[in-house]
Amino acid sequence: MNFEIIEKDAMGRIGKLKTPTGVVETPSLMPVINPNLRFISVEEMRKIGAEIVITNSYIIYRNPDLREYAMERGVHELIESKLPVMTDSGSYQLLVYGDVEVNNRSIVEFQNKIKSDIVVPLDIPSPPDCGRDRAEKDLEITIRREKEAVEIHSEIGDDRLISAPIQGSTYPDLRRKSAELAAKLKADFYPIGGVVPLLDSYRFQDVVRIILESKSVLPPTAPVHLFGAGHPMVFAMAVALGCDFFDSAAYALYAKDDRYLSVHGTKKLDELQYFPCSCPVCSSITPAEMKKLPKKEREIELAKHNLYVSFQEIRTIKQAIKEKMLFELVETRIKGHPYLVAGWRAIKDYISLLDEYDPSSKQGFFYTGVETLYRPSIRRHQKKILNIELEREKYTISTENGDLKLIPAFGVSIGEFYPAGHAEIPDEDNMEDEAFLTALNGLLEFLNHHSDKMFTLKVGNRWIEIMKRYNIKLPENARLEIGE
Amino acid sequence: MNFEIIEKDAMGRIGKLKTPTGVVETPSLMPVINPNLRFISVEEMRKIGAEIVITNSYIIYRNPDLREYAMERGVHELIESKLPVMTDSGSYQLLVYGDVEVNNRSIVEFQNKIKSDIVVPLDIPSPPDCGRDRAEKDLEITIRREKEAVEIHSEIGDDRLISAPIQGSTYPDLRRKSAELAAKLKADFYPIGGVVPLLDSYRFQDVVRIILESKSVLPPTAPVHLFGAGHPMVFAMAVALGCDFFDSAAYALYAKDDRYLSVHGTKKLDELQYFPCSCPVCSSITPAEMKKLPKKEREIELAKHNLYVSFQEIRTIKQAIKEKMLFELVETRIKGHPYLVAGWRAIKDYISLLDEYDPSSKQGFFYTGVETLYRPSIRRHQKKILNIELEREKYTISTENGDLKLIPAFGVSIGEFYPAGHAEIPDEDNMEDEAFLTALNGLLEFLNHHSDKMFTLKVGNRWIEIMKRYNIKLPENARLEIGE
């Protein structure tokens, strides 16, 4: 096993991926290195936080000088990297130009020869919403090429990692099929491809579904790469859904265009009067000063900021995983854009998948809004509480002092249950109807489960209002006592 | 006028306060300097972002050496500050020790002699929830002392700023009375006092009410200081409610206790395995390395980080004001803690106050959740739309293609209205019931306003469901057409 998982939260994890050049801690962001261009050195990127980089083997392959150099001395020396190097295959060029001048076997063998740490076959990225026929045909070729690549790798027999990209356009079943077939090949690394156009147009709901459809069939131990995702605004969400790797050309592309990355989105340098950041770049220069720098210098400074803020987000996510507060972090991040909110809410269709992954040993719990209701720990609590032993005949359930407690979001609870008993929840006036509804659903289930016991329910007006509005009737073994 | 307002959003503003030593741009954070202790120099603080600092005149007054030095050369030389210096009066010591060895006149005159830029009378901070009698008695003394201080200042006749603190414990009417009387004195600077115990116990709802009660009677042009607030997690919220100044002893106190500040709360250094920050401190050292530093050095590094992150938040807020996206920033920040959510939602009782302040010229609008519904621009839109001229007899109102558009949150709209027409809103499935309810209330008002016209309403199931659940009946001039 090349990938070891050390710490888990939501569907995210901190892991260690072993590559021929060294071990990489995940979640990890790979800055894209243009082999034609010395811009920011890999050594400098390492200082900013990079543990692995990615470059394009197809660009190297097509340039006789680069090609010869790389064949002789390897890709690491070519781009002056002491870090592991993943190589892309030319699939991106295939998407953009419609054709490439290389076949799958040649580019896979070439990546091996130049000693890439993670090799990518020439998969076909189908565009979003393309015809189903095309998506199916593309996928067939992709799978065939992945098979060929895995065979080449087992023939060569060294320890370079081979990846099996997941395609299938925006068809959930094709994504699932692609992931299933990829998993069967027992590849070392699973990039989810074809998502860049979706990310660029803020179609986060589609991205969430594509990730979760793929994860639903990939083994939990598979390292997953959200190929082409380089904007820090999506990192927390994607990690919480089980992505381990990102790659960023964004840091450089955005800098070239005078754009400044933040976890809440992108700003044009022209719009900035204050830097919302304190990285070494932003704390040594003002936006006005940066605007006056010569273009080339400005581009480098912006690119460095873009890297700093991206790696800061990676560390923030890792810390949240350690604290088992990744859901809380994501719920903060998605408020940066309405489409992120909408995207994240798609998880409600995948609660049982999340439940399989999300560790149950949590101490803290912050209620931050309706998204909190989709966290598996709420549903898990409602199931767990069914099993408490009730010895007496009669019990009171109350929001204040009863035998059993009624808590918004969670439903019925007793003292020692984590995290319900220790959840930080706003006062009832400041919680959404949905939080009471979720609790009431749990309550009904509990009452029905203990149909041989009698319960007296003491709740305030807010609860009663919602029971009326949603036409919720208590079963016969429960009596409502009004006026608390 | 010492205070000039340059840019506005929500109730927040970017302003310039003229002091004898120089101009300070607001919102501004004043690091607290301990006159007994060289820790981080004022010059270094200036580099991190400080434009003004605060120190304690009572500590200087009581120490013969410091006192003599300050009387001779001024407080700026004493603490080696080229920046403006505000001085506190000993009120904090009064709160903590119950008594101080100085009277109001002496400490006000002393602050003037040592050339403080902003002078504070010896006000009485009443603790939260103290008896009403005590709060009233304390307030009476505070007001008397403020009067005396203002008189002393007009006698002296130089340009030092005199402040009039606002007290009144947790009694909204006393806070209002205090602010009203303070405003009558035409002081230069208005600290809202006695909030530290509330902030320390996360009673943000009380803090929000205290600020808004005070702001409701202070002139809009008064510079307001949330005295003792130094944690960056509350800055965005407090600025959006109209606070211009903060002061931070937190940066140092927390560092002493190995605590690390972030906009989402406080972390113990021991709990950190990754720094969620890229300030010059956090990008040059890991938590493991910092834990190994000698106590004194560690304290300084932590304090510097705490300052970096605090000033970063100040710049982030200023940038949000420039972009007129301060509501959006606050709605992101409050998701850091459930009590911040609850605190912020208290604004719904002060919508008309917010409406007075919040500028109407906004281009962007992000819907991020139910808190968005409390923004004045929604209510403002619903009032404004009543005035459109309707020439025909019959109109269709539809969520898709009608003469008039029905938009969640906003209600009835037509193309050219800002920000409704350009709002970024999630799809209907991902919006809360409350957003539809708010829109439907606006719709009813619109239909009733145009009772001489006929309307056909074409909406989807979600709208109809909510109309049923909340028992909303259309007036006679409107007909519901189902099935879109």
Image (tube, coloured by chain):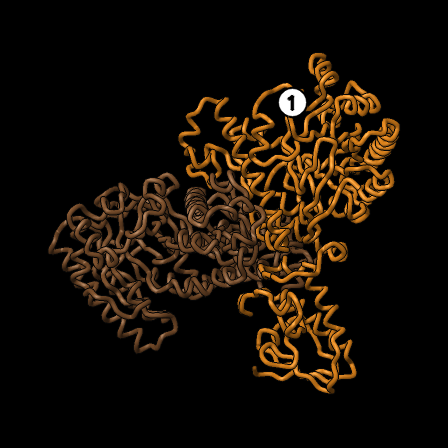
Chain colours: A orange, B brown
Q: Residues within 10 Å of mark 1 (few under 14, many from 20)?
A: many
The answer to whether residue B380 is seen in the rendering is: no
In the depicted structure, whether residue B178 falls above or below residue B47: below
Q: Residue at x 70, y 46 (%)?
A: A208
Query: To which quarter of the image does residue B128 belong?
Result: bottom left
On the image, the x and y values in percent for residue A275 come to: 45, 38
Which image quarter is the N terminus of chain A in?
top right
Left or right of B345 on screen, residue A220: right
Q: Which residue is mark 1?
A: A79
Q: Residue at x 63, y 32 (%)?
A: A31
> Farthest top residue?
A64
Which image quarter is the C terminus of chain A in?
bottom right
The answer to whether residue A177 is seen in the rendering is: yes
On the image, the x and y values in percent for residue B316 come to: 45, 44
| Amino acid at pointer 1 | Ile
In the image shown, does B374 or A320 lie closer to the viewer? A320
Left or right of A207 on screen, residue A257: left
Q: Residue at x 24, y 52 (%)?
A: B118
The answer for which chain carries disc 1 is: A
Left or right of B68 on screen, residue B355: right
In the depicted structure, whether residue A159 falls above or below residue A35: below
In the depicted structure, whether residue A124 falls above or below residue A439: above
How many marks the image carries: the answer is: 1
> Farthest bottom residue?
A393
Tell me the element at label 1: loop
> Farthest left residue?
B155
On the image, the x and y values in percent for residue A125 come to: 76, 32
In the image shown, does B182 or B95 lie closer to the viewer? B95
In the image shown, does B23 or B362 lie closer to the viewer? B23
On the image, the x and y values in percent for residue A458 come to: 62, 81
Q: Residue at x 49, y 58 (%)?
A: B374
